[in-house]
Image: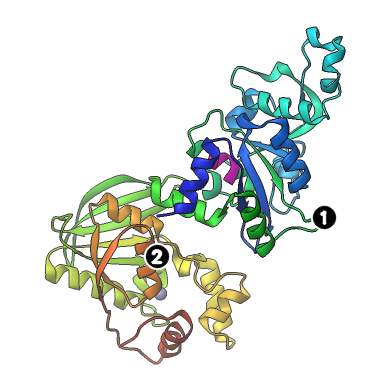
């Protein structure tokens, strides 16, 4: 899985550059990225001449702290649209022994390619500390979020993630946006041709995030206890997301065997349906169907994901209901509120299931996207168990929109 990411990590480890593209709804840019440790004046010249954007040095927070670098605009005053964290610019401080050496004149002002290359190398050198730099200078460091692309889908985070994944420390990278000869932002086909011409691996930030979601443990089991219910006796496990602290629930009945497909339901929270039995949707019927079916079989898992209203949250879900009362359907209402039709993600569900020892499933769902979502992160779905729900006068339209616009399979 993820051959291009594996290749990119290998390239970074070997000191090569890769091209990283962000989402087309974000900056929609391609950046040349490499580990700062391996920069040379030749590679710097390539970034300058062929990349043409702003050459910056992304690093992890810890390194920036050690180098005593501070943001040029404090977080609460940062009005840049992606909240990019530019730090105070620096140059490597020329040692006294070099200052009067005419052979080393190129280093004097800090702007030459050799001088800027040296500054970058020193930023990545663990033996070099804050006192070895002058401020301001000709190199701008950037600081990445601690959780990398899983917290912020920017090139800064992608660069530091790639360096971390390739095992290099401290985690310091170099990046530059790729611009065309006329200075316009390079996109799509231009970037693909550029990558082919120079033999560079091209990846997207979304792929890098998926790679991490698949390979890193992002949930922790926080508590477990017995939970007798009117459907039968379950064990309840609470899982906490490591990044957000968000809590999710798993109900397990019987003992799970790794080799046998486990009857599974991955259910997204719906307070109005699950608790108040709202007739606007079919969530409580699906939940009850799942618990009853598991109880009948005696073995199974229900993962209850804390993503209310297709993950737009309770307030916006109710706002969406209000819009639907004015004639919009569920998909149109979500789009009006600034969301994609379905914001839910399934990698957390997959990680919970894996932690419980589930690898093969009989999945109770009518949503083909959920099948793709769970299989994408390495679970095998051997059979889909359809959930048969009778529609009522309140949810008939909602169910038909789910079928026609979201691709749900109804029976
Ligand atoms: Zn619902």
The residue drawn where x is 68% and y is 56% is 29
Q: Which residues are magenta?
A: 158-162
Q: Quadrant of ligand 1?
A: bottom left
User: In the image, 107: left or right of 291?
Assistant: right
Residue 280 x %, y % = 42, 82
Q: Quadrant of residue 216?
A: top left
Q: Which residue in the protein does label 2 denote?
A: 373
Measured Cα–Cα span from mark 1 to mark 2: 39 Å
Mark toward the viewer: 1 or 2? 1
Quadrant of image for the C terminus:
bottom left
The verdict on residue 154 being magenta is no
User: In the image, 354: left or right of 63?
Assistant: left
Q: Which residue in the protein does label 1 denote?
A: 183
Q: Is residue 244 visible?
A: no
The residue drawn where x is 25% and y is 57% is 359
Q: Earlier in the sequence, mark 1 or mark 2?
A: 1
Q: Is residue 66 visible?
A: yes
The verdict on residue 160 being magenta is yes
Residue 265 x %, y % = 28, 67
Q: Is residue 239 above or below residue 28?
A: above
């Amino acid at each position: 899985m993820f051959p291009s990411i594996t290749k990119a990590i290998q390239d970074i480890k070997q000191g090569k550059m890769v091209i990283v593209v962000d989402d087309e709804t974000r900056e929609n840019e391609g950046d040349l990225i490499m580990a700062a440790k391996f920069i040379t004046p030749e590679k710097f010249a390539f970034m300058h001449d062929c990349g043409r954007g702003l050459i910056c040095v992304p690093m992890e927070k810890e390194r920036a702290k050690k180098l005593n670098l501070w943001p040029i605009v404090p977080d609460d005053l940062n009005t840049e649209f992606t909240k990019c964290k530019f730090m105070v610019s620096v140059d490597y401080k020329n040692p006294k022994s070099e200052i009067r050496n005419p052979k080393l004149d190129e280093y004097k002002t800090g702007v030459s390619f050799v001088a800027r290359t040296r500054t970058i190398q020193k930023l990545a050198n663990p033996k070099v500390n804050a006192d070895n730099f002058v401020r301001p200078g000709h190199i701008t460091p950037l600081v990445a979020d601690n959780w990398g692309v899983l917290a912020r889908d920017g090139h800064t985070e992608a660069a530091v993630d790639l360096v971390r994944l390739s095992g290099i420390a401290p985690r310091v990278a170099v990046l530059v946006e790729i611009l065309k000869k006329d200075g316009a932002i390079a996109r799509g086909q231009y970037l693909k041709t550029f990558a082919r011409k120079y033999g560079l691996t091209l990846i997207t930030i979304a792929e890098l995030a998926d790679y991490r979601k698949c390979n890193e443990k992002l949930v922790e089991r926080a508590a477990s206890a017995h939970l007798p219910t009117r459907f039968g006796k379950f064990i309840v496990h609470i899982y906490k997301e490591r990044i957000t602290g968000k809590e999710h629930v798993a109900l397990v009945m019987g003992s799970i065997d790794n080799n046998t497909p486990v009857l599974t339901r991955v259910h997204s929270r719906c307070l109005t349906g699950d608790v108040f039995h709202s007739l606007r949707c079919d969530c409580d019927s699906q939940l009850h169907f799942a618990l009853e079916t598991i109880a009948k079989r005696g073995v199974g898992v229900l993962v209850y994901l804390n993503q209310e209203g297709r993950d737009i949250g309770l307030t916006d879900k109710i706002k969406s209901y209000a819009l639907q009362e004015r004639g919009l359907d569920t998909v149109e209402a979500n789009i009006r509120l600034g969301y994609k039709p379905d914001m839910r993600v399934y990698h957390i569900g997959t990680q919970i299931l894996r932690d419980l020892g589930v690898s093969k499933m009989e999945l109770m769902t009518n949503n083909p996207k959920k099948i793709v979502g769970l299989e994408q992160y390495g679970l095998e779905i051997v059979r889909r168990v359809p959930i048969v729900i009778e529609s009522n006068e309140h949810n008939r339209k909602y169910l038909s929109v789910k079928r026609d616009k979201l691709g749900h399979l109804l029976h």
